[in-house]
Image: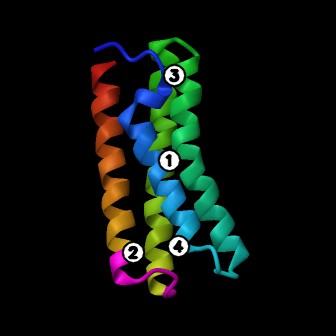
Amino acid sequence: MKINRFENIIAWQKGQELTILIYHNLKLNRDYGYKDQIQRASISISNNIAEGFERRSNKELKNYLYIAKGSVAEVRSMLYIGKELKYFSTEQFDLLYLLSIQISKLLSGFIKTL
């Protein structure tokens, strides 16, 4: 199947989902430094997928997918900090963590196909 739009990429869709969940879970959080960092990292996931796709070059797309994968790792690292600081319940952490792992695996698979 040929992907014609970045919106059809599952990793992009899941990146959007992760970002929305992070925003919702931290809506009332007043640690603005933490909140800003994890939100920016999560937004970077889907934005890098979109930007790489629109460049219409497999080489550039692959590079941007690696950047997106790095952003997923940053989010996951920040999730551990948030869990320790009680910014996330265990259930929230588990959901966000599993979603980040899923996105990372999707990106790895996509990179391998290129």
Residue 13, by quadrant, is top left
Instruction: Specify whether 38 is left or right of 7.
Output: right
The answer to whether marks 2 and 4 mark residues whose Cβ atoms lie closer than 8 Å is yes
Query: What's the CA distance linking mark 1 and mark 4?
Result: 14 Å
Q: Which residue is mark 1?
A: 16
Report the span colored magenta: 85-92
Query: What's the CA distance linking mark 1 and mark 3?
Result: 16 Å
> For residue 90: magenta?
yes
Q: Residue, x 38% and y 74% (percent of image)?
A: 93
Query: What's the CA distance linking mark 3 and mark 2?
Result: 31 Å
> Badge 1: how crowded within 10 Å, few (<14), some, or many (20+)?
some
Residue type for callout 4: Asn
Percent position of residue 87, x then y: 52, 82
> Badge 2: how crowded within 10 Å, few (<14), some, or many (20+)?
some
Residue type for callout 1: Gln
Query: What's the CA distance linking mark 2 and mark 1?
Result: 16 Å
Q: Residue, x 43% and y 74% (percent of image)?
A: 80
Q: Which residue is mark 2?
A: 92
The answer to whether marks 2 and 1 mark residues whose Cβ atoms lie closer than 8 Å is no
Query: What's the CA distance linking mark 2 and mark 4?
Result: 8 Å
Residue 89, by quadrant, is bottom left
Sooner in the amino-acid sequence: mark 1 or mark 4 = 1
> For residue 50: magenta?
no
Q: Secondary structure at mark 1?
A: helix
Q: Residue 25: give its label.
A: 4
Sooner in the amino-acid sequence: mark 1 or mark 3 = 1
Q: Residue, x 64% and y 63% (percent of image)?
A: 37
Q: Which residue is mark 3?
A: 53
Sooner in the amino-acid sequence: mark 2 or mark 1 = 1
